[in-house]
Amino acid sequence: MFEFSLGELVVVAVVALVVLGPERLPKAARLAGLGLRRLRAQWVTMKNELEQELAREELARSLRETQQALDETRASLEQRPAPPPAPSDEARHDR
């Protein structure tokens, strides 16, 4: 998502040390880490929900297509004339 080089991280750390001071920097770092973990967890949750919804939609679309193909097959079978009945076993023995 975000890409930082080592040099950029060092600059951010030095600026944070100067602005916050050595007393407040550890607490600020913990809060920033906690915020990033929460943000990442929310992102993963949202991504999983989106993937599940897309999978449900794909399954529903596949089901509709299969039902349509089944209906078309059923309609074509109903339009065909019925084949003549096969002779029964008793009729064959009578010959």
Image: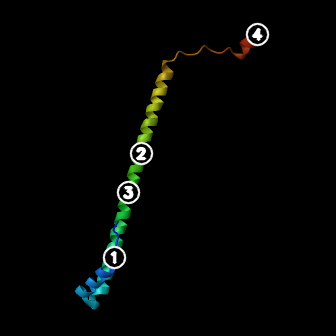
Mark 4 neighbour class, 10 Å CA radius: few under 14, some 14 to 19, many 20 or more: few
Q: Amino acid at mark 1?
A: Leu
Sequence-earlier tag: 1 or 4? 1
Residue placed under numbered mark 4 in the picture: 94
CA–CA distance in space, label 3 to label 2: 14 Å
Q: Position of residue 30 (x, y in %)?
A: 33, 81
Kindly identify the residue that appears in the image at 28 percent across and 90 percent down.
22
Between residues 55 and 82, which one lies in front from this camera angle? 55
CA–CA distance in space, label 1 to label 2: 36 Å
Question: How many tags in the picture?
Answer: 4
Residue placed under numbered mark 2 in the picture: 58
CA–CA distance in space, label 1 to label 4: 90 Å
Q: Position of residue 91 (x, y in %)?
A: 72, 12
Kindly identify the residue that appears in the image at 72 percent across and 16 percent down.
89
Q: Looking at the image, do the residues carrying marks 1 and 2 touch, with CB atoms under 8 Å apart?
A: no
The quadrant where residue 83 appears: top right
Labelled disc at residue 49: 3
Labelled disc at residue 34: 1
CA–CA distance in space, label 2 to label 4: 58 Å
Nearer to us of marks 2 and 4 is 2
Nearer to us of marks 3 and 4 is 3
Under tag 2, what secondary structure?
helix
Kindly identify the residue that appears in the image at 37 percent across and 55 percent down.
50
Q: Amino acid at mark 2?
A: Glu
Q: Amino acid at mark 4?
A: Asp
Mark 2 neighbour class, 10 Å CA radius: few under 14, some 14 to 19, many 20 or more: few
